[in-house]
Amino acid sequence: MHTRKLSGITQIRLIIIVAVLSLIAGFGLKQLMRSSGSQPAAKLQATILEPPHVVKDFRLLDHDGKPFTSASLQGHWSFLFFGYTNCPDVCPTTLKVMQAAWQLIPHGAEVKAAPKMYFVSVDPDRDSLKSLKQYVQYFDPTFIGVTGPLDEIDKLTNQLMVLYGYEDKEKDSDQYVVNHSAQLLLLDPRGRLRAILPPPHKAANIAREFRIIRRQYGD
């Protein structure tokens, strides 16, 4: 559920576009949640999907060039955020928040089903694996960058109701903006979408709500 190039929005400020896309994505997620009987959990900003949404297969690459598929999401909790490295505000702000949240969330090798943080680039034309790795590891050495062909990115974004689109993208030009949804997605150790964390994001809230969700649903 996305369009690769958005028309008629070149004069709209990026922050407004992102907000609109997030609202649209939120509507789509509400439809998904309505069909699965999901309700917002009491005292949580996050919305819990009950039952969780099964993520079907896709084929991307992580920043080390290793295959990243639905199987890569098995055996641990996963936070996913979709964006791009040239993003002027939403992406670095969100990753900065996750950097702080990571200090509050146990994620070492000794932790059972320890969570992983994935930043999925929807701008593969500019985001090489090398640049993506440098970008995410600036925030935390354990963060993992992911990207791949647009058709494979779409297989994942369409399932998760993540929207993105290019503004002012011209042939042979790398001067353009990518508008995208801003929610964080939490997948359980079976690789299923368990919760949606809407913006604005705060590190303490993310850590607290993750602990609650994990305690409620286990590993």
Image: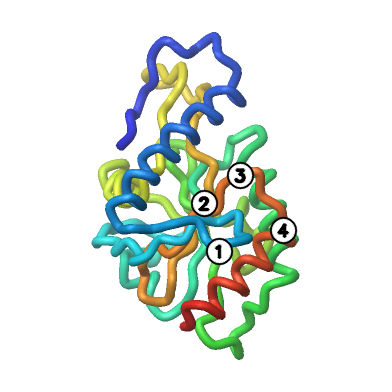
In this view, the mark in front (1 or 4): 4
Tag shown at residue 203: 4
The residue type indicated by label 4 comes to Ala
Quadrant location, the N terminus:
top left
The residue type indicated by label 3 comes to Pro
Q: Which of marks 1 and 4 is nearer the N terminus?
A: 1
Tag shown at residue 161: none
Name the residue: 53% across, 61% down. Answer: 41
Q: Mark 2 touching mark 1, by CB under 8 A?
A: yes
In this view, the mark in front (3 or 2): 3
Compared to residue 84, the image places residue 24 above or below, namely above
Q: Which of marks 4 and 2 is nearer the N terminus?
A: 2
Compared to residue 8, the image places residue 87 above or below, namely below
| Most foreground residue, 44 or 136 | 44
Mark 3 highlights which residue?
199
Where residue 90 appears, as percent x and y from the top left, is 63, 38
The residue type indicated by label 2 comes to Phe
Alpha carbon distance from label 2 to label 1: 8 Å
Mark 1 highlights which residue?
117
Find numbered disc 2 in the image and state the secondary structure of the residue it sits on: strand
| Most foreground residue, 151 or 8 | 8
| Most foreground residue, 33 or 5 | 33
Among the 4 quarters of the image, the one containing residue 99 = bottom right
Q: Mark 1 touching mark 4, by CB under 8 A?
A: no
Q: Crowding at label 2, few (<14), some or many (≥20) Cα neighbours within 10 Å?
A: many
Alpha carbon distance from label 3 to label 2: 11 Å
Q: Earlier in the sequence, mark 3 or mark 2?
A: 2
Alpha carbon distance from label 1 to label 3: 17 Å
Find numbered disc 3 in the image and state the secondary structure of the residue it sits on: loop
The residue type indicated by label 1 comes to Met
